Image (cartoon, rainbow, N blue to C red):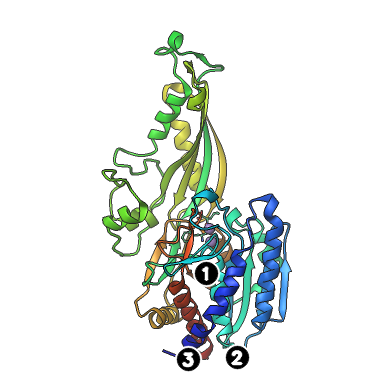
Amino acid sequence: MTDVAARVRELLPSVRADLEDLVRIESVWADPARRPEVHRIAELTATLLSQAGFDDIQIVAEGGAPAVIARRPAPEGAPTVLLYAHHDVQPEGDATQWHSPPFEPTERDGRLYGRGTADDKAGIATHLAAIRAFGDELPVGVTVFVEGEEESGSPSLTALLAAHHDLLTADVIIIADSDNWAVDIPALTVSLRGLADCVVEVSTLDHGLHSGLWGGVVPDALSALVRLLATLHDDQGNVAVEGLYEAAAADVEFSDERVRADSGLLDGVQQIGSGPVVQRMWARPAITVIGIDTTPIAKASNTLVPSARAKVSMRVAPGGDAREHLAALTRHLQAHAPWGARVTVTPGDIGQPYAIDATGPVYEAARQAFRTAWGREPIDMGMGGSIPFIAEFAAAFPDAEILVTGVEDPGTQAHSINESLDLGVLERAAISEALFLKALGSDR
Ligand code: BES
Ligand code: MN
Ligand code: MN
């Protein structure tokens, strides 16, 4: 392999030490008490970039979390590449269920455990490794953009992109915040589902009633809500809402055994929906009920519940419009309440899906870099989850080519307890990125 790869390998221990310092900072923007930590990590990110040879560095904010923008100009005639990652993390959840402290990076069996080791402080580490491999001789212009509120839905990203549009303009954008197919098989993420959610409230009575006196005569709201929620799927588990969009997933085999192993499906429990796994996972809408407000069992008495609420979350296939999908879901909920029960739907969050046309020389150069670094053919992978800000980047920079890469793998457990990074994946991802930058720079 080339000397760039050897250089990344040499640098990796120091990059890993920097990653460990990043992980020790509890940068949970969603927790108001820990917002100062997000400011601290922005400072550290800026310092690390300064040590990597950037002198044009700013920490910026538009009413939200601090983001870091660092730039090194392009050599004559070379393109500019924007490298994205986020330095905020999800809350650690129940710390007692972690096998090592969530904010103390700990290595076990080739994996580095800790909140944000993968999602997405490893994205920062990957960019640092790729940049440092070139010393003073970067083959392309590089703008590093690390934001601090991705895990909160990037509410001020549109304002940041508008306020710093000229600084952030690039020919190629690498978003290092996604998954790989396996620890030894790389992937380019080529589509992501969108997101739309709402709260549906069902009411049948203006106050609770004795369930013996009135049961069997007037309906309780919880039974009505459960029946309404049941209309969202057919008996096989396919979504039964009219007017939703379905795309076509890439032709990739994802076995039923892998579904069972990767998801932890219990013995005897079946999958839902019909058709290939990747079609259901990446290219079709999905509806899930993610919470219910009603009388808790500890407080249950023989009383008919007068009203109850559920939060319904829908993923939107690439090509569909999240706003129109939310309207279709709302219409369905209003039309299907049993027994004339009253229904109120309160709209929630919206995030658009995104599909990338990953053809042409830039994507081919990326695939070649993956092949060299991993020794395996990369998979064009769809993604059932959402990164709503990608659609915003695409709208702000319509001429840029967007690559969605990442340092996660199926064992990462992002957002969950015992999140971890595979250290081999970090090495291969960093080498891939360095080789890709080199290819973009020599293509003049
Ligand atoms: N890095 C993830 C997205 C992701 C998840 C990529 C799993 C690959 C595998 C990102 O940080 C994330 O969590 N996104 C949120 C978006 C939400 C906060 C708007 C998601 O998908 O729920
Ligand atoms: Mn992420
Ligand atoms: Mn995340």
Instruction: Report, in whole angstroms, how far the alpha carbon at label 1 lies from the one at label 3.
Output: 23 Å
Residue 3 is labelled as 3
Q: Is mark 1 within 8 Å of ligand 2?
A: no
- Residue 67 can be seen in this image: no
Local crowd size for mark 2, using a 10 Å CA cut-off: few (<14), some (14–19), many (≥20): few
Q: Would you place residue 308 above or below residue 369 in this image?
A: above
Q: Which residue is drawn at 45% across and 61% down?
A: 412
The numbered dot on residue 268 is none
Q: Which of marks 1 and 2 is nearer the N terminus?
A: 2
Residue nearest the observer in this picture, 159 or 182: 182
**Front-lying residue, 170 or 290:** 290
Q: Answer yes or no: do the residues labelled 1 and 2 have beta carbons within 8 Å? A: no
Image coordinates of residue 402 in percent, x first then y, are 51, 71
- Callout 2, which amino acid? Glu
The residue shown at (73%, 57%) is 63
Dot placed on the residue nearer the N-terminal end, 2 or 3: 3
Q: Mark 2 points at which residue?
A: 137
Local crowd at mark 3 within 10 Å, few (<14), some, or many (≥20)? Answer: few
The picture places residue 183, in percent across and down from the top left corner, at 39, 69
Residue at mark 1 to residue at mark 2: CA–CA distance: 22 Å
Residue 440, position as x, y percentages in the image: 51, 85
Name of the residue lying farthest toward the top: 213
The residue labelled by disc 1 is: 176
Q: How far apart are marks 2 and 3 (CA)?
A: 14 Å
